[in-house]
Image (spheres, rainbow, N blue to C red):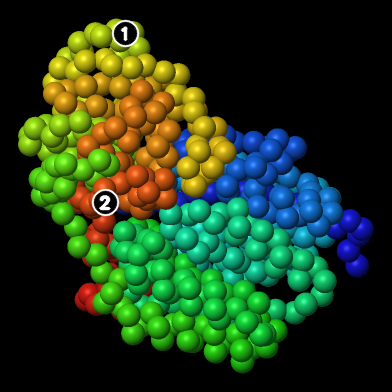
Amino acid sequence: MFRTPPTILIAGFQHETNTFAPSKAAYENFERGEGFPLMSRGSDVLALRDVNIPAGGFIRAAEAAGYALSPVIWAGASPSAHVTRDAFERITGEIVASARAQRFDAVYLDLHGAMVAEHVDDGEGEVLARVREAVGPDVPIVASLDLHANVTERMLHNADALVAYRTYPHVDMAETGARAAALLARLMSGEVLHCASRRLPFLIPINGMCTLLEPSRGMYQRVGEVEAGDVVSASFAPGFPAADFPECGPVIWAYGHTADATNAAVDALYRRMIAEESAWSVTFLSPDAAVREAMRLSEGASRPVVIADTQDNPGAGGDANTMEMLRALVRHGAKRAAVGLIFDPDAAALAHRAGVGAQLEIALGGQSGVPGDQPFVGTFEVMFLSDGRCRYDGPMMNGMQAELGPVACLRIDDVLIAISSSKAQMLDRNLYRVAGIQPEAMRILVNKSSVHFRADFEPVAEAVLVAKAPGPMTADPADLPWTRLAPGTRTRPGGAPFAG
């Protein structure tokens, strides 16, 4: 029997792991948040109710239902290589210790679904298994997942229900948390839900997953439509195609009152994906071609042309410091262009010491170690300085306060560069404004992002281009040096199967 009101443990642990990326996520990265809310504990977690993240939507829904909430910790860090053993064990340890310390009626976890730690391939599966062991078999556990989750059998086994975002850019994060709360309410009322799942046999480039475009838009519309009758929840996670372990890749799953209806819904979605496999492919522009096309499109335009520097996206494991797109802008004489955010704390510190108007001869960025990338050596003028504090006002992470550390705007020729002391994906126009750059006034914007920027930038963009410049986040998964994928998995839509 549940108490009145039911007491629910709440915790969040978010990381998207690119096992091919250059730098790992240490505990300090989670403390800083790096584009996520700062690490918070106890009642401070409840302040996230007004932020567009899953925990925010869950908290609002649970409070409206009158549940007693027992928040433990919320921690997230920018995508990178593996989460260190220390960070994983410290954060997971807090969650599990709280789960053991008292009796709870239910558990809600705000997870990503694509975490790999130094010592654990399936980070979320391990977290869920430990929480399950702590609370026992009869306490409902529900978790929300990112659209890019690599959903594993262990995750499905140890959670009573998992629910994933349906938008990319992720504008429905809080909505997903609310859907998780609704599923948890069903479980606490005694409903028995059958689970069905199917794994797709091919990897999808992350640029092809954008739900503003086909075929992703139509697929997610269909995911919503199969939730009818006995099927109470359906999810599709295209996966994060940069985690080298056997269960990397897209998964479809659903929950329903009957096994037959649930299996039929999943099978229908699976057949659609197989039939449309070739449509999930993506084409990319070279840096030079992207800049030339942006310059052409911007002639006479009243709005900026946006170029996604997709392979240096810090939202997918890049460090936001590769320089080839900046070189291409300078090489072609681009006018009224801006690039952001470049993660270079040393350059930001030098600019702050020198002051606005100073001339700096520095080697900017270029520390990725990726072939074809090197520092940009030049003379830059310091145009603007700030403390890096700003609020996200766009659809993604709306309401979140960002702490980027010292920020500077540098100029070379007619190109402005937004420099930050903390990594953050360029997904909100305020991340330019915090560096004194008005994005709407530019002719060309080069964003260190793959897709998330579209939510706030596409409404003001003349056009959006995708460039494949050297960077740690390989845009085409078939270009990655896979060693541990499940044999037979096609490394791109319609591509050759991985032989192992």
Of the numbered discs in the image, which one, if any, rests on residue 200? none
Q: Position of residue 437 (x, y in %)?
A: 33, 27
> Would residue 203 be seen by someone viewing this image from the given angle?
no
Whole-percent x, y for residue 92 in the image: 62, 48
Q: Is residue 162 left or right of residue 203?
A: right
Q: Nearer the viewer, mark 1 or mark 2?
A: 2
Q: Quadrant of the N terminus?
A: bottom right
Element type at marker 1?
Answer: loop
Q: Quadrant of residue 164?
A: bottom right
Q: Secondary structure at mark 2?
A: strand
Q: Nearest the camera: 368 or 163? A: 163
Could you say which quadrant of the image residue 224 lies in? Answer: bottom right
Measured as percent of width and height from the top left, residue 461 is found at: 30, 46
Crowd rating for badge 1 (residues with CA inside 10 Å; few <14, some 14–19, many 20+): some
Q: Quadrant of the C terminus?
A: bottom left
Look at label 2 and name its amino acid. Val
* Mark pair 1, 2: CA separation: 34 Å
Vertical relation: 429 (above or below) 176 = above
Kindly identify the amino acid type of the residue bearing the numbered disc 1: Gly
Task: Say left or right for 2 vs 121.
Answer: right
Question: Which residue appears at 31% of the width and 41% of the height?
Answer: 448
Disc marking residue 355: 1
Question: 462 above or below 329?
Answer: below
What residue sits 73% from the left and 45% below the top? 71
Q: Looking at the image, is mark 1 or mark 2 earlier in the sequence?
A: 1
**Does residue 34 appear to the left or right of 435 in the view shown?**
right
Give the label on residue 464, or none.
2
- Residue drawn at 63 percent across, 82 percent down: 228
- Residue furthest to the left in view is 332
